[in-house]
Amino acid sequence: MTLGAAMTRATLLVLAAGPVCLAGCSKLAEIAGAPSGPPNRPGTVIVMNNVVDTMFVGDSVAAWAQVNGADGRPANNDTTITWVTSNPQVLALDPSHPVVPTPPAFSWIFARGSGQATITAHTQNVTASKVVTVLAPADIAADDHRFAFALADQPSAASYSPASSSRFSSSGGAITVTRDSIGYYHVRFAGLGTKPEQRENVQVTAYGSPQGVSCKLLNWQTDGSDMVVPVHCHKPGVDGVAVDSRYTVLFTGGRAFDPSSPFAFAERLPGTSNIVLDTSETAFNSVTGHILMGGGASGWNFAFPGVGQTNAPAAVLATGVGSGPEHCKIANYDIGGGGLVASCNQPDGTAIAGRPAVMWFTRGRVGHRFGYASTNNIAAVTPPVDPTLTFNSSGGAVTSRRLSAGQWTVTFAGLGRPSGATDIAIVSALKELDHICGLVSWANSGTNDLTVTLQCSDAAGTPLDARFEVLVVE
C-alpha cells in the first residue's frame, strides 16, 4: 500500500478549522473543525468521518458524525447523535474518553478483539453505519520491527551501496542509493515494504555540506517488497536550487524500538488541515493510539496523548516532506503533555504551511546504544544540555561545546561505537528561529565516547547560533 492510500482509506470528509491544542486536546469539536452558524434545515443524511474499513487490535480512532441537509451543509446544531456498536468485544466505544453527542458528534472507537462489527451513528430517523474489520497482529503482520538507516556519502555517484560501516537494515536486504538528477536521490531498502496496517516514519539530515543546505523527503512508498525513500537537497537562499549533497536517512516502523517506552510519529498528509491520524500509515502512538493534528501557515500541532505522561526526556525531530524547497523544524514542544509544533519556511525564510514529518523518541532498540541531546544557552562556550531533551543509554554524561558561530560538538560519554557496530545520527532544528541544522560528522572520541559535530545557519547559509536536537541510534 502506498502513502496516498492512507487518505482515501481514512478520510470521508474533512473540515478545516482552528489549530489543535498543544496539551490536553480535550476540545474535540474544535480540533476537527466544528462549523459555526449553519442554517437549520431538515437533516437528510449522517456523514461519518474517520470510521475506517480496517483496524487492528489496540488501535483507536476519534470518529465523528454530523447531520447534513440536502444541500450538503450541517442541518441542525443542537441535534444529539447516538453511537452504537454491534459487537463491543470487537469494536468498543472507548470508555476512557467521553462521547460528545452534539454536532459534530465525537466518539473514540477502540478495537478490542479480532472480528467484524458495525458502528452506527443515529438521530431520530437518520442513520449511518459502517462495517469495520478488526484484525489481530498475527493476521496482519503488524509486529512491525522494521528499522534501517544509511549514510549517503557519494552525492555525484549514479548508484551505489553505502559503506557497511554506515548502513543497517533489519530485513538483511540490500540498501541502494540512486542519483536521479542534481539534488534528487532515492534510497531503496530491500525487504522493508509496508504490509497491511504497518506504519512508518522517515527522518533525513544534510551531512557534511555547506551550511544552510537542506535535505528533505519526497513521498516515500512501497515498491513490491521494498521501501523506496526519495530525498531532495537544495541550497540556501531565495531560489532554493537543487544541489548535490551528502545526507543521512533513518527509517523506522512503529514497533522498532523498546516496546515499554513511548514512541510516536506523524506526518501532515497532503490536503489535510485538521484530522485525527490514528489510522494513517504514517502516524503511530505506542501509548494510546490517539493522534491529533491541526494548524495552518504558522505551524502544525501534533498531539500524542499519553507519550509524555512520565515526563521522561524525549528526542523531538522534524523533517520536511514534498517537492518544494521549504525546510521544517520543531518550533515548540510540551514534553509532559505529549505535544509538538512543527513549522516550515521557504528558502527566503518566509513561513509556509509545508508538510512536516515529526518523531517523538524515548528509547532505542533493546540492547543497542542510543543517545540524544539539546542545549540550553546556545551562545555559551560549553552550554548545558536541556535535561528534558537529553539522554544517554550508556548512563554517561552528555556535554556540548560551541566551536564557533553555528557549530557545536555534543559528546556522549561511554557511547563509543564498538568494533563491528553501526549507528546513524540525525539532527533537527529546534525552537522558534528560522534556521537549518545539519551534520558535520559523528565518530568515536576519547576512550569510549561518541562525539557528534553539527552546524546551523540561517536560510541564507550564514552561520547562526540556534537550538537543535541531535539523535544517535545503533
Image (spheres, grey):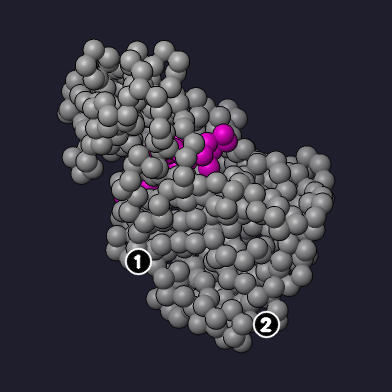
Which of 108 and 144 lies nearest the eye of the viewer? 108
| Residue 272 shown in magenta | yes
Q: Position of residue 9 (x, y in %)?
A: 45, 25
Mark 1 highlights which residue? 312
The relative height of residue 411 versus residue 73 in the rendered view (above or below) is below
Amino acid type, mark 1: Ala
Tag shown at residue 403: 2
Amino acid type, mark 2: Leu
Residue 440 visible in rendering: no
Residue 211 occupies quadrant: bottom right
Residue 93 visible in rendering: yes
Secondary structure mostly seen in magenta is: loop
Task: Count the labels in the image.
Answer: 2
Tag shown at residue 228: none
| Furthest residue toward bottom | 381
Residue neighbourhood size for the residue with mark 1, other residues' Cα within 10 Å, grouped as few (<14), some (14–19), many (≥20) = some
Residue neighbourhood size for the residue with mark 2, other residues' Cα within 10 Å, grouped as few (<14), some (14–19), many (≥20) = some
Q: Position of residue 107 (x, y in %)?
A: 27, 34
Whichever of labels 1 and 2 marks the residue nearer the N terminus, that label is 1
Q: Where is residue 435 in the image (x, y as percent from the top left)?
A: 66, 64
Q: Where is residue 351 in the image (x, y as percent from the top left)?
A: 65, 53
Q: Residue at x 45, y 81 (%)?
A: 397
Write down the region rendered in magenta. 268-287
Which of 346 and 29 lies nearest the eye of the viewer? 29
| Residue 247 shown in magenta | no
The relative height of residue 313 versus residue 167 in the rendered view (above or below) is below
Q: Which residue is drawn at 59% across and 79% down?
A: 378
Q: Which residue is drawn at 62% across and 72% down?
A: 466
Which of 345 and 56 lies nearest the eye of the viewer? 345
Say which element carries label 2.
strand
Residue 405 occupies quadrant: bottom right
